[in-house]
Structure formats: C-alpha cells, structure tokens
Image (cartoon, helix red, strand yellow):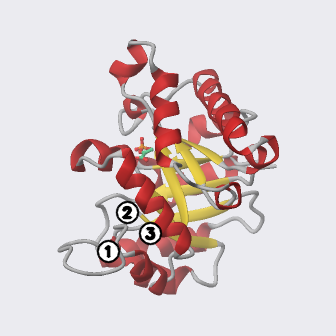
Amino acid sequence: MARMIIAGNWKMQNDINGSVELVSGLAAGMPAKINCEVVVCPPFTSLETVYSLAKNTKISLGAQNMHFEDSGAFTGEISASMLKSVGCKYVILGHSERRAIFGESNDWINKKIKKALSSGLLPIFCIGETLEERESNITFDVIKKQVVEGLKDITAAQMADIVLAYEPVWAIGTGKTASPAQAQEVHKFIRTLLSELYGAAIAAEVTIQYGGSVKPDNAAELLSQPDINGALVGGACLKADSFIKIIEAAK
Ligand code: PEP
C-alpha cells in the first residue's frame, strides 16, 4: 500500500522570522499520533533553520525546486547536494508555477528527477492539466505526456522513491477544488499508467498526492479516495492550525 504523505509548499512566503514561527507552531501542535508523513517545503533561505527546528520532530524537510547540474556558472540556482547538505529529504519538481512562469519543460523536469534520485533526494513530481486542457477533453493525454516524458529512463527500482502530485492547474490557489470523484478519476488513470510502465506491484506502492485548494474542510473526503495517498498543500499550509487539521484528516 502506498504511504500517505501530507506536504506543505510555502512557495515564496515566510522570511526567517515567519519560518521559525510557522515550523515552531507546527511542531508544538502536531498530534501525538499521526497516520501520515508530514513534509514542509520552505523557501531556500529558511531550509537550514527549519531543519534545525524540525529534525527531532515528525516533520520532514523538502525544497521547492533545484537545478539538475552539480555545480558551476548557473547564477541563482541551487543543486541537489546543497539541498542535501541542509537536511532536505524531498524536493518538489515540475510544479505548475515552475512550468508556466519559468518555462520548465518535461525534459528539464526529467533531468531534475534523475539528479535528485542519484543524490539521495526523493522527488515530489507534479503534474496536472490547465482549465483549457480539461475543457478540451485532453486531460488524460496531457497527464500521460507529462508522466511518460518526466519519467523517461526511470527504472522500476527508482520509481519506488518518487512521489507523484496530481495538481489540476485550475484548482491551484483558486479556491476551486477538484471534486473527490474528479480527482479520483485522474489518480486512477495515473496508477493504471504506472502499472503499464512499471508493473502493478510498484504502481500500488507509489504515493500519489492531490494538490489544488486542499483545505481542512475538504481534506478528509479527498484523502478517503482509494487512489489519493496524501496532499500537496499551498495556501492552507501557511497557518499551523489549518495544516494540522489537514494532517489530522489523513487516516
Ligand atoms: C500548490 O501550489 O501546490 C497548491 C496546491 O496550492 P493551493 O493549495 O493554494 O491551491
């Protein structure tokens, strides 16, 4: 069975003071018994500080992006080994904001996934269709292309270390959540595709998170769908109490 993972993507929010406040609030409010792994993904500038405050708690650390090269003249970029050196376990790759605003292609994302894996980081690989694509009835084609090209040359053994996040672009930051049935339909399609690519046993183990306006009041129903194994949360992870309610919704 796939493990349940609830991750919070802080995006470009929280300076050091805000980061200390948020992770401290999470650590203090975390229920004694939780049924999922909890990951926070602060901005690069807060990673080390958040790691030092979270390392003896149930909170794991992730980054929001990285470059696929090891080092060199890539002004403004961050490498996998840099992320490892400040305590990251996960890295979000292929977020729709990286694809749409910064022009990241499936090929770049594939290179990043390979570099993350060879460096010992677990990728949270994001995929999802735009509203226009959904309304043109090409959601499954878009998802298939993103999965096949993003996972090019990834082996079955490596697949066990990858988390997928299905995030319909029209649901991100809009308050419009996919209905549990809409999300489950795409998650099932993704798992079937993984089964064709890697076999049923591996596909059953892959965590497929849902992301897109997950809130305390819709989390339980989304997370109870058979192929939804967690959430990637934006807005609702920025307050400790609402993120904790989502964590509590994971059964
Ligand atoms: C996200 O950006 O990954 C996300 C899901 O954001 P929100 O929860 O705010 O829709």
Q: Nearer the viewer, mark 3 or mark 1?
A: 1
- Coordinates of residue 29 in the picture (x, y in percent): 61, 67
Residue 22's label in the rendered image is 3
Mark 3 or mark 1: name the one nearer the start of the chain.
3
Q: CA distance from mark 3 to mark 1?
A: 24 Å
Mark 2 near mark 1, Cβ–Cβ under 8 Å?
A: yes
Q: Quadrant of residue 168?
A: top left
- Coordinates of residue 196 in the picture (x, y in percent): 70, 35
The residue carrying mark 1 is: 78
- For label 3, being within 8 Å of ligand 1 is answered no
Tell me: 94 left or right of 16.
Answer: right
Can residue 110 be seen at all in this image of the molecule?
Answer: yes
Which kind of residue does numbered mark 2 sit on? Answer: Asn
Q: Quadrant of residue 130?
A: top left
Which kind of residue does numbered mark 1 sit on? Answer: Ile
The residue carrying mark 2 is: 65
